[in-house]
Structures are given as C-alpha cells and as structure tokens.
Image (cartoon, rainbow, N blue to C red):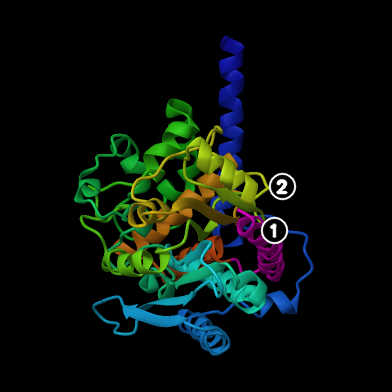
Amino acid sequence: MKKLKIALIVVIILIAMGLTWATLSYNFYSPKDVNTKPDDASLKYFQESYNESREAFRTSAVLLSKKFKNTYQGSFQVPAKNDKDLTVDIFYIPAQKSKKGLIIFSSGIHGVEGYTGSAVSHMILEEFMTEENLATTGFLFIHGMNPYGFKNNRRVTENNVDLNRNSSADDVLYKTINTGYPAVIDLINPQGKVNTYSADNIFFELRAIGKIVRASMPVLRQAILQGQYQFPAGVYYGGAAAEPQIKNIAPFIKQYSTGYPFVMNIDLHTGYGERGTLHLFPNPADNKIKALTERIFKGYNIDWGDGKDFYTTTGDFPGYLEKLITGSTYIPMTFEYGTLNSQTTIGSIKSLQTTILENQGFNFGYKSDKDKIAVEKNFREMYFPSSPAWRTKVISDSRVITKIFLKQFNGL
C-alpha cells in the first residue's frame, strides 16, 4: 500500500510538471486537430463577428419567407449599458400542410458559442427547408440568445450571468445554494489582475490535481459546473433574477409550439468533449421520452448522464422550455461540438483554467497586454476554433445527423 501511494505521488508530480510546462507556454497550447479536409461549401456558413452572423441569419430568413407561407421573422432588443443594437432574432416556418411536429433550434445561449450555432442554423436553413421537410414539421430558430456575449466574445451576459444556469420562470432557482462551490472558490475565483506567469497560474494544474485527489473529478466537476447564485463575479453565476431575454422569449415559445403534438428542442453548444466530435446530451428523461429520443437519433451514441463524467446543472435552457410548452410531448436535446478534449483530465483542467482567467481578466483586468491577448485568444479558440478542418467537420457532421433525425422525427 505504501509503495502504491508513493507511485501515485510520483505520477501526479510528473503530470504536474508536464502541465506546468504547458502553462509556461500558454500561447502555444493547442490540441491535435481533426483529420478532415477543409471544404469551402461548409466554411461559407461561418462568420467572424456577431453582426455578420446575424445578417446572414436574417438574409436566409427573408429568402425563405418569400418561398413559404405564414412565416414569422422578428427580433427583440436585449438592453445593455453601451450598446443599443443587441437582439435575439427569431424565425418561424410553420408546417405547411398539417402540424405534426415542431423543431426548435436555439443558439448562442453561451454567447461566444453563437458563432458555431449560427453557422449550423444557417446550413439547416439553406439546405433543409424543403417542401418535403416542411409538410408536417415546423421550425423555430432562435438566433443569439445571448447577443452581448456573442458580440464581445464572452460566454456570459453583461451581468456576468450564465444563461444556461439562469433559465427559470420560478424565482426559487436564484436562491439555490451550491454547497460544493465554496470548497473550490479559492481555485476558480482568483482576485487581482491576470498574470499568466504568476505562481498560482504556473502551478494551477498541480493545485487542480490536488483538489481532484482529495475530492475526485466527478465531485469537483459537479461543484464547479452545477451553477451558483451567491458570487456575482464568479464563474458559472446563475444570476439573482431571470435575464431579460429569458422572460422575453417565453411568448414566442408558447405561441409557436401550440398545436404541435411533438416539440423537440436542439440547443447548439461548443466546448465540452472530444475535439471534432458531436456529443448528444439530452436532459434526464422518463422512459417514454428516452425511447422517442433513441428512435429519433437511432445509430448515434446518446449520453444519458449515467457515466463517470456526468454532472447536473440548475436553470438550463432546454429545461425551461419544457415548462413553457404545454399540450405537447417535449423532447430536449443538446448538441455539443467538442473543442479542447475536455472529456480528459488534462483537457478539463486546461478548459477550466482558460475560463477562470477570462473571467478574472474581465472583472479585474490584466497585468499586461500580452496576458490579455493570450487569454482572450485562447478563450475564443476554446469555444470557436479557427481551424478550417474543425469547422468543416462541424458542418459535415451536422448535415448528416440532420438528415437522419428529420426523417425519424417526421415518422413519429
């Protein structure tokens, strides 16, 4: 037993030394890229700014409105202190012959993830809005739910709120106590200006591994990612009340879901998981919904949350939609396009560090321009990789799965 403990300590030290070197080379860190040949037909769907993404979405909506009847295209403003041009855009195409099912595509819940969500939405609008697909299925697209984060390359709103921890019509949510969060607050909410070469950052991996050894990775992941409502400047803050867009989207959801026996939400995200892999994460479901989901996504691996990496969240957007949609069978699904191999311990630690540094820099500033550039670049890359190969694979995988699930959904 003693030899085992010594061996474990040696392994931890070796891992920490390797990870420390990665931290010292913070600008250099990048996972191995996906083995996909870039394709201009797929890359055309990606834009490099919020305004360009919104314009592309609106243009597609206008063209489709001329082709199909009874569509709705609109938007509502999201208030911000210094920006009067932040909007959540909505486009609805009803089933053209009879209402059998509605599919809601939501994107940009985590602002900076909106680039990919917008690209996938654009592809679906351009390639899948056909008379055949629209005969009995309607589509509701919600573009840029967090326009502030989208425009400013942040994951959260202007109020530092994570919308996927904030979505609720019940104020009880905002009184939730995350009992595990205080145990890791010293690690994940550092004070002062960001210095990527400080001792805390150089030895961040060692400190994180120490937490993992003491509490285990599942316990640590749950404490951090669940969502918290007591520390407004902290990561994964769920807010003290519902953000404006959470309230303002409700009438649209209620109106356009009415009359459809089946309603499915596909919430588009990037970040977690194996780089270049499309992960399917439905909310925990009863046996009926689970069977329907497996039927719709037949042939795909669905993560039902029963693995060792599973964690629960509070105030998630798909769960909020379930409360708004009545009289229909509701099927939630999250598409997560992996970027940084965060399903591994090393990738998870690097993802966490980048998230922490971005939040710290926003709240307290940076010691130097070099620190600011490095952190902001890595943060954007973590949620919106610049790799043409990664982007091509996102569209390719989305194209394939959309063809499959539309056929299965239409057959319910």
Front position in the image: 126 or 369: 126
Callout 2 secondary element: loop
Q: How many marks?
A: 2
For the residue marked with disc 1, what is the amino acid? Ile
Would residue 235 appear left or right of 201 to someone viewing this image? left
Q: Which residues are magenta?
A: 385-412
Disc 2 target residue: 299
Would residue 198 appear left or right of 410 to someone viewing this image? left
Check whether the beta carbons of the residues at disc 2 and disc 1 lie within 8 A of each other. Answer: yes
Disc 1 target residue: 404
Front position in the image: 267 or 339: 267
For the residue marked with disc 2, what is the amino acid? Gly
Q: Residue furthest top?
A: 1
**Residue 128, quarter of the rendered image:** bottom right
160 in magenta: no
Question: Measuring 73% from the left and 78% from the top, which residue is drawn there?
Answer: 41
Question: Measuring 53% from the left and 71% from the top, which residue is drawn there?
Answer: 95
Front position in the image: 194 or 277: 277
Considering the whole magenta stretch, tell me its main secondary structure: helix
Question: Measuring 52% from the left and 52% from the top, which residue is drawn there?
Answer: 333
